[in-house]
Image (cartoon, rainbow, N blue to C red):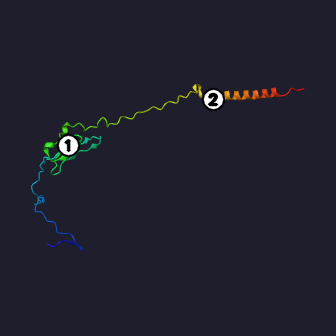
Amino acid sequence: EAARTKGNKNLGAPKRQLSNPKEKEVNSTVGAPVVKLPSKSNHDKCLGYFDVSGQWDKEFECNNTSHRYCCGTCFLRFCCDKKAERLDQNTCTNNATPVWVQTPNPIVIDEPKNEYDPSKDKTNITVYISCGVIAFIIIAGVFAKVAYDKARRPPRE
């Protein structure tokens, strides 16, 4: 049977007629269903921790081919290949923020109230007294000079 055409366009092969309209076509290439088995992890995970400087080091997987175990100390963790040197991370307590790293809440300092009371201000009085003493000395000097000059003048005839 020839391919159907419309104008110059090829419409492809004709549809195959099913003998029974309720019958569905089955793909013959379908294989058995694949069941994924849960794989047991054969490597460690170094959990996140705070190091000696207080910096957070996030968790990481030791999934290298030869370095599969989390080793080291609670404050310096790394992957190694010897199971005997494995770190028991359950005994480590540095997975919470250390006290010395925690920043305290900021201290709020209340602004001092403006408690200026002009009636209690003594600075003006000091200025007034100093200027008054200086003025008194100048006036006393002027009067002394005038009195001295009058006394030195010859008497009138």
Q: Amino acid at mark 2?
A: Val
| Left or right, residue 63 beside residue 108 | left
Secondary structure found at label 2: helix
If the image is split into quadrants, where does the N terminus sit? Answer: bottom left
**58 w.r.t. 115: above or below:** below
Residue farthest to the bottom, as pictured:
8
Name the residue tied to disc 2.
127
Front-lying residue, 29 or 25: 29
Q: Looking at the picture, how far across and down is residue 18, in whole percent?
A: 12, 63
Please rate how many residues cluster around mark 2, counting C-alpha atoms within 10 Å: few if below 14, some from 14 to 19, many from 20: few
| Left or right, residue 3 beside residue 153 | left
Res. 74 image quadrant? top left
Please rate how many residues cluster around mark 1, counting C-alpha atoms within 10 Å: few if below 14, some from 14 to 19, many from 20: some
The residue lying at 59 percent from left, 28 percent from top is: 123
Res. 132 image quadrant? top right
Q: Looking at the picture, how far across and down is residue 58, in whole percent?
A: 25, 44
Q: Which mark is residue 91?
A: none
Name the residue tied to disc 1.
72
Q: Amino acid at mark 1?
A: Gly
